[in-house]
Amino acid sequence: MSVRVRFAPSPTGYLHIGGLRTALYNFLFARHHGGTFVLRIEDTDKTRYVEGSVENIIEMLHWCGLDYDEGPGKGGPYGPYVQSERTEIYRRYARELLDKGAAYIAFDTPEELERMRQRQQQAGIVPKYDRTTMRNQFTLGEEETQRLLAEGVPYVIRLKVPLTGVIKFSDIVRGEISVPARDVDDQILLKSDGFPTYHLANVVDDHLMHITHVIRGEEWLPSMPKHVLLYEAFGWEKPQFAHLPLLLNPDRSKLSKRHGHVAVEDFKKEGYFPEALINFVALLGWNPTGEREIYSLQELIELFDLKKVNKAGAIFDIQKLRWINAHYLRHKDPKELARQLQQYVQERNLGDFSLEYLEKVVILLRERVDLLPEIFTFGDYLFHPPTHFEQEYFARAWSEDIEALIPALLTLLRQIEPWEHTVIWEQLKGFAKQQGIKIGKVMNALRLMLTGKSVGAGMTETMEVLGKEETLRRIEQFVTQHLPALRQQMAENASE
RNA sequence: GGCCCCUUCGUCUAAUGGUUAGGACACCGCUCUUUCAAGGCGGCGAUACGGGUUCGAGUCCCGUAGGGGUCACCA
């Protein structure tokens, strides 16, 4: 039987980084085995639905290269793939459970349930639905139940969990697990609004969609006994289960947006590459060798093995993500990067720059930043002449000697041909030697005049990218405009 | 609190019962050098604790401690 897995998010917001990891492992498992990857939307809670989430989930999965084979907008043999369009199915199966005696009807109001929990809490026992004292099929009797139903009194359908015995199941990553039945609650399967809860819908759909492996987050482990009971009540063969370790905040709690963003979309906006995000997230909880850090999606597919998934949760370390992103930044095709950079340029209204120019900018700065858009802050001077000059750097890099050399320097630069960094470098070295000055002093002065800041890419390379004309213009502008202003500032500071 | 899960450097992780417990991020140092990076080289740094099984335990068993998840007409 061929592998069929599903990613089943609920549309309550944006695709979460933890969701992405779950989706990724499902995807990798499916592709590794030549199976099918299904997307199913679990929107059985009308009150939590957020407009646009389905689109966001699909868009982000696509951006990451995790395209599904069956699902909303794509169809497939076991649709519909949106649970709110399948309510009839769940009602039918809930009725089947009723007929089989595996579930029962209950009429308790939310207030009554709340009071029950309070009583239990005060008595020091674990809150759990009490089948023997609440208002349900058993305490009310068949006749009364039918009467209330006929009257249209709201009701729910609950799972009839055995009072004794042990529920056992096995998990691919965690092995054998058993839970005493008395600790399992009589879960509501069908809500009074006619919608199913997760537990019913999930089990029914996984069965109907022929899912062979359920790969989901560890937060679902506690509800496994209920699901096991459901499969047994229906007489269905269970899929195999794999509960993935959680993604954690730095304080080891479940990953949340309290410690930074968690929406995949936010990482995209910040300029992370999907390859980097996938690469990073894949290695959170699984590792093929431990000796390598960089893997393409294709390699991940080839190497993926559910049995090697870790048991312990993993802290989401943004530092390492940045490092991986920086790695991709340094190894991607500069032409492609230039195209991306051009999009950012347009979004930010920074002006008109040719792809040719942007490619040079990328090559110049890619080793100095972790994220492509950081080029705009780190290398702002490549998009407009410097308007701000670091005072501390000015104090260090500027001197009377240097100032006296500017006319000669301009003359030298003007006649440099071709305007290439190796030639510029040789000429400047000769110039420094001839003037009896350290080359470093010349370079620092140039850096100050051309960029305004103390750190940046190689100076002669920067000059080449800027072009001769722009270089000369900036030097002249510095001397005529910025220098007097800087002097004045320095004087003001000194007098304070 | 009940139940369930988990525990190797600060972090992500590797290690058929036999390794000086390996790699990577971060940090530190050196190197390169016109600044800053990148790269190269090196350093720091871990089997939670206590018992047992075994010739031999990170690895198997038990216990303790710590952490997490979950206990809804949410998923």
Image: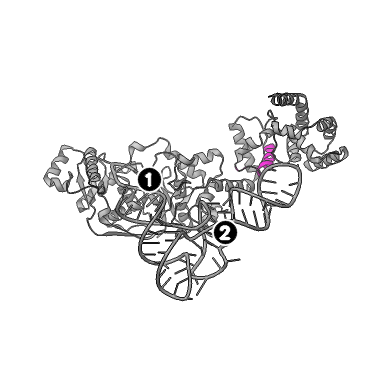
The stretch drawn in magenta includes residue A368? yes
Q: Chain of mark 1?
A: A
Region of the chain picked out in magenta, as a range? A355-370
Are both tags, 2 and 1, on one chain? Answer: yes
Q: Quadrant of the N terminus of chain A?
A: bottom left
Foreground label between 2 and 1: 2
Marked residue chain, label 2: A
Instruction: Name the residue tied to disc 2.
Output: A291
Q: Secondary structure at mark 1?
A: loop
Residue under label 1: A81
Percent of width and height locating residue A48: 36, 37
- Residue A123 is marked as none
| Residue type beneath disc 1 | Tyr
Of the two numbered discs 2 and 1 on the same chain, state the one appearing first in sequence. Answer: 1
Q: Amino acid at mark 2?
A: Glu
The spot of residue A369 in percent (x, y) is 63, 42
User: Can you say whether B57 is above or below A467 in the image?
Assistant: below
Give neighbour class at mark 2: few <14, some 14-19, many 20+ (Cα, 10 Å).
Answer: few
Across and down, in percent, residue A130 comes to: 21, 48
For this orientation, the residue located farthest to the right is: A434
**Quadrant the C terminus of chain A occupies:** top right
